[in-house]
Image: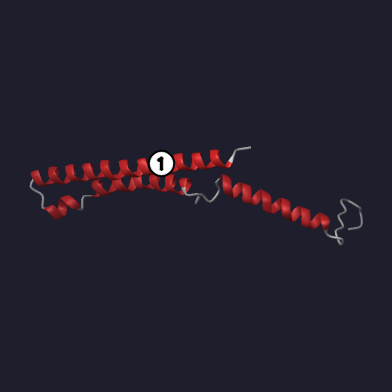
């Protein structure tokens, strides 16, 4: 069983990894965008055409999807993540306990009286 300190340390490490990933996302994509814009401008395109090039947005979008999943995992927003599994297990076990503790609980399998 993990201690509170070990769990907290792992959460901090996960948060640090996410912030590092986010920082790299912003810096690298900004560099790519500026480079693409200057390249388009040198080729005689207008600033508007250079800025609205789909290739520029595709890089942000594609990496952004991965970053969104990383954020969801880091901040426990995963729909079917470990926490979801733990919550569902507790829910079903508590329901089973309530059913077994109920005085009106009767359960017969295959008594042939259907």
Quadrant housing residue 42: top left
- List x then y, in percent, for residue 34: 18, 45
The residue to which callout 1 is attached is 16
Relative vertical location of residue 103 with respect to residue 50 in this rendering, above or below: below
In the figure, is residue 9 to the left or right of 111? left
The local crowd at label 1, few if under 14, some if 14 to 19, many if 20 or more residues have their Cα within 10 Å, is few
Residue 43 appears in the rendering: no
Q: Quadrant of residue 95?
A: bottom right
Q: Position of residue 99 (x, y in %)?
A: 79, 57
Relative placement, left or right, of 65 versus 32 is right
Label 1: which secondary element = helix
Going 48% across and 46% down the picture, which residue do you hit?
A: 73
Q: Is residue 34 visible?
A: yes
Quadrant showing the C terminus: bottom right
Quadrant in which the N terminus is drawn: top right
Please identify the residue farthest to the front as the structure is shown: 5
Residue 23 screen position, x and y as percent: 32, 43
Residue ID at (22%, 42%): 31
User: What residue do we see at 83% from left, 56% from top?
Assistant: 101
Q: How many marks?
A: 1
The residue shown at (54%, 40%) is: 5
């Amino acid at each position: 069983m993990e201690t509170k300190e070990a769990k907290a340390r792992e959460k901090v490490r996960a948060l640090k990894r996410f912030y590092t990933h986010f920082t790299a996302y912003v810096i690298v994509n900004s560099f790519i965008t500026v480079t693409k814009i200057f390249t388009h401008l040198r080729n005689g395109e207008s600033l508007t055409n250079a800025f609205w090039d789909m290739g520029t947005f595709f890089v942000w979008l594609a990496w952004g999807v991965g970053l969104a999943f990383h954020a969801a995992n880091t901040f426990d927003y995963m729909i079917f993540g470990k926490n979801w599994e733990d919550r569902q297990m507790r829910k079903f076990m508590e329901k089973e306990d309530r059913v077994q503790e109920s005085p009106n609980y009767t359960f017969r399998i295959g008594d042939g009286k259907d």
